[in-house]
Amino acid sequence: MLVWLFGSLAVVALAILVAGFVLGAKQRGETSTREGPEVYAEMVQRNSSRESRREGQSVLKQKTWVGGTGKSGQVTVTYTSKEIAEAWRQSNLKSVAPGLMIAGGLLGVFLFGGLTLVSLGGILVLVGVGLVLMGGYGFWQFLRGASR
């Protein structure tokens, strides 16, 4: 019974975490895109070095010639605990709602995911306790940063 309860709450926390990331990217995300042959060369180089490491080969001996174009995109969203605390004090939570969703979602995933593992029993109890402790420590650090 507890496995289903904690597991369901962990899934809800994960959904809140994902929604916070998406909402934050839409509201405050800084998008940067690059395009051209150099982007394609970087992508091929990254993939070939990853495959070489898997096979145990040295990347230094490898030469690659590529042709084509590539496109790369990146979204950056930044929230500080101080900014969230100021918005909380001013009751202006709409501007930092994605940051709160991300923090709460992470806490929920660690807490309820860990409690799910604890309720399963066996050796998973150790992993579950570790997850709960990591989530608690992270949340404590978040609160400490917000109070400064």
Image: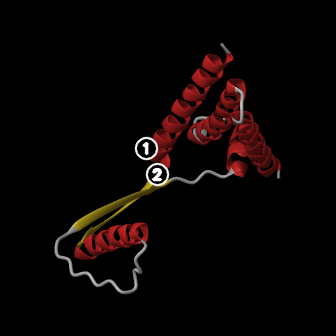
Amino acid type, residue under disc 1 in the picture: Lys
Amino acid type, residue under disc 2 in the picture: Gly
Quadrant of res 59: bottom left
Query: x%, y% of residue 16?
Result: 55, 32
Query: x%, y% of residue 41?
Result: 27, 75
Q: Helix, strand, or loop for circle 2?
A: loop
| Towards the viewer: 32 or 49 | 49
> Is 137 rendered above or below residue 114?
below
Q: Which residue is mark 1?
A: 26
| Towards the viewer: 99 or 92 | 99
Q: Using the image, tell me which numbered label, if any, was put on residue 111.
A: none
Can residue 134 be seen in the rendering of this structure?
yes
Quadrant of res 128: top right
Residue at point 27% right, 63% down? 71
Quadrant of res 105: top right
Q: Is residue 129 left or right of residue 53?
A: right
Q: Which residue is mark 2?
A: 29
Q: Is residue 112 left or right of residue 49?
A: right
The reply to whether discs 1 and 2 touch (Cβ–Cβ < 8 Å) is: yes
Can residue 90 be seen in the rendering of this structure?
no
Q: Residue furthest left?
A: 67
Residue at point 49% right, 49% down? 28
Residue at point 26% right, 81% down? 64
Query: x%, y% of residue 126?
Result: 75, 39
- Colour scheme in the image? secondary structure
Quadrant for the N terminus, please.
top right
Marker count (numbered): 2
Residue count near mark 2 (Cα–Cα under 10 Å), binned few <14, some 14–19, many ≥20: some
Residue at point 65% right, 35% down? 104
